[in-house]
Image (tube, grey):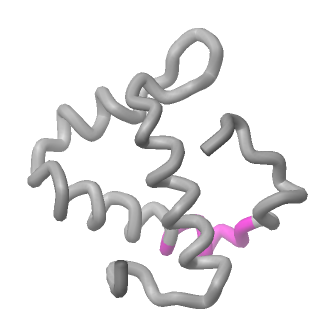
Amino acid sequence: MPFPDSPESIGVLTPHQAFLAMSDYIWRYAEVAGDDLITLLGDTDLETDGKPVDPAAWGDWLASVHRILAGQPPRTGP
């Protein structure tokens, strides 16, 4: 997915929705990569241009945001 996604294209999250998206993102990360917190922190660290070190992290994050904005509960479905 392109970086960065503008707020107009995805909407604005409330603090509660942001927390749900974060919970969903971390859970899905653990499903794929295990419980390695250090790798998660490294993958989501930011380069000098503001992009995550792991480009896939941005797409995965947006997928979690879109799930929450669509009203899906975190940690469910594909």
Residue placed furthest toward the top: 48
Residue depicted at 83% across the width and 59% down the height? 9
Image quadrant containing the C terminus: bottom left
Residue depicted at 27% across the width and 55% down the height? 29
Image quadrant containing the N terminus: top right
Q: Which residues are magenta?
A: 13-20
Residue depicted at 71% across the width and 67% down the height? 13
Residue 67, placed above or below residue 15 = below
Q: Is residue 11 left or right of residue 41?
A: right
- The rendered magenta stretch, by its main secondary structure, is classed as helix
Quarter holding residue 12? bottom right
Q: How many marks?
A: 0
Q: Is residue 40 left or right of residue 3?
A: left
Quarter holding residue 23? bottom left
Q: Name the spot of residue 31 as percent of width and height, x first.
A: 17, 63
Residue placed furthest toward the right: 8
- Which residue is more in the foreground, 72 or 23? 72
Q: Name the spot of residue 67 as percent of width and height, x first.
A: 55, 76
Q: Is residue 16 on the magenta stretch?
A: yes
